[in-house]
Amino acid sequence: MNNEKDPCVYILASKPYGTLYVGVTSDLHGRMAEHRQGLFDGFTKKYSVKQLAYYEMHESMEEAIRREKQIKKWNRAWKIRIIEQMNPEWSDLFDKKWGTILEGPADAGRIDSEPEPNCDLDGPPPSRG
């Protein structure tokens, strides 16, 4: 991932299995810096939700916004499931020392592969199988 504008949906957590926040941005690096520094009053600052637990990149901002709205409608268990598919250790995927975004364990498989043809972006996440 580079520092150029890349549409992205992300999930922050206050701690593993803690308070969750779903957001969308075209600049994940910059947005994470803002969340870390508590630059905006609101939910993430009030509840100290700063750990990048999950993210997914999209081709367009419209697609990312659609996906954000979909994930926001999901129940908590579904959100936890997609976090654990990418990041089973609940590691903070934002390296605060260097300001970089780390690849989650599931990213390696996504980089070289196409989405599953039967993937329903409007439904719940796939089962952990």
Image: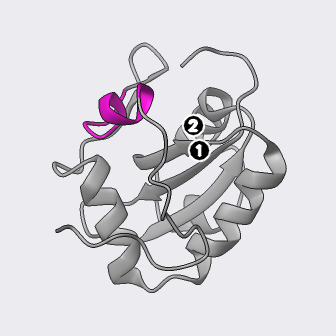
Tell me: 29 left or right of 114.
right
Tell me: 114 left or right of 16.
right
Task: Measuring from the top left, give residue 106's x and y in whole percent.
Answer: 30, 40
Q: Is residue 49 visible?
A: no
**Which residue: 83% across, 53% down?**
62
The residues colored magenta run: 103-112
Q: Is residue 105 magenta?
A: yes
* Residue furthest out toward the right: 62
Secondary structure beneath label 1: helix
Which circle marks residue 32 in the picture? 2
**Which residue: 33% across, 81% down?**
77
**Which residue: 48% across, 47% down?**
115
Q: Quadrant of the C terminus?
A: bottom left
Task: Measuring from the top left, give residue 7's x and y in whole percent.
Answer: 71, 39
Q: Amino acid at mark 2?
A: Met
Q: Which residue is mark 1?
A: 35
- How many angstroms separate mark 1 from mark 2 (CA)? 5 Å
**Other-residue count near label 2 (Cα within 10 Å), few / some / many at <14 / 14–19 / ≥20:** many
Task: Measuring from the top left, give residue 13's x and y in whole percent.
Answer: 39, 59
Q: Amino acid at mark 1?
A: His
**Other-residue count near label 1 (Cα within 10 Å), few / some / many at <14 / 14–19 / ≥20:** some
Total numbered badges shown on the rendered structure = 2
Query: In which quadrant of the rendered view does residue 84 lie?
Result: bottom left
Query: Circles 1 and 2: CB distance less than 8 Å?
Result: yes
